[in-house]
Amino acid sequence: GQQLNQSPQSMFIQEGEDVSMNCTSSSIFNTWLWYKQEPGEGPVLLIALYKAGELTSNGRLTAQFGITRKDSFLNISASIPSDVGIYFCAGSNNAGNMLTFGGGTRLMVKP
Amino acid sequence: GAVVSQHPSRVICKSGTSVKIECRSLDFQATTMFWYRQFPKKSLMLMATSNEGSKATYEQGVEKDKFLINHASLTLSTLTVTSAHPEDSSFYICSAPGQGSEKLFFGSGTQLSVL
């Protein structure tokens, strides 16, 4: 089946630094989604991407849908302590809204 | 975005008892809901797809008789962990697709601890 490789697995950065994480897939997805999960909570949708090459921003977050439709990246600019959490990429092929999740990137921000 | 309400947020139970977790879509209807299980520091693992008015579809390796799913209305799906054992302790999360989109919206999760 499809698998998503997400990297890095974890990051420990200084407040104010920019962050970049990415996901690659062995096969094509029609939709890429990025979620953030805080401890003890469900994932919250950050950005949804629907077209190859699409670049979308949400505040300090920017995500792109790769041209090959097999990858996506998420950038966070000028990180702040509340950015701490686990970020998950997810791919969908519209098959009943089923998502395939990456392994997650655990982000830690040092004030 | 759409709001999915899940409760309880935390439950502690004795081994052998059953626990019911509810997932509600607020202000929108969901003919399909998804149930995930998440172990500490791991990604979400799809357990089953809940279908309104019909049987749930379980992923390979998930015991149907252990994890009972009922989707009795367009806004409510329930997951019952029957005869719970300590190995069933985990974080369970439900989700529902927003109407007309591929976006999934998640509940806040239920931390189950079986003693």
Image (spheres, coloured by chain):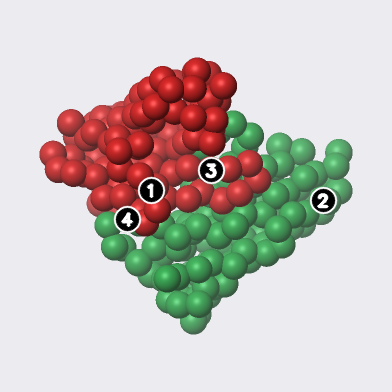
Chain colours: A green, B red
Res. A99 visible in picture: yes
Q: Secondary structure at mark 3?
A: strand
- Location of residue B31 (image quadrant): top left
Chain under label 1?
B
Point 59% across, 67% down: residue: A5
Foreground residue, A1 or B75? A1
In three-dimensional space, the C-alpha distance between marks 2 and 4, rounded to whole angstroms, equals 33 Å
Amino acid at dot 4? Asn
From the image, tell me which residue sits under label 1: B62
Amino acid at dot 1? Val
What quarter of the picture does the C terminus of chain A occupy? top right
- The spot of residue B23 in percent (x, y) is 34, 30
Q: Residues within 10 Å of mark 1 (few under 14, many from 20)?
A: few
From the image, tell me which residue sits under label 3: B38
Name the side, left or right, on which A94 lies relative to A6: left
Foreground residue, A62 or B59? B59
The image shows residue A48, relative to residue B12, as above or below, that is below
The image shows residue A46, relative to residue A30, as above or below, that is above
In three-dimensional space, the C-alpha distance between marks 4 and 1, rounded to whole angstroms, equals 20 Å
What quarter of the picture does the N terminus of chain A occupy? bottom left
Point 38% across, 70% down: residue: A30
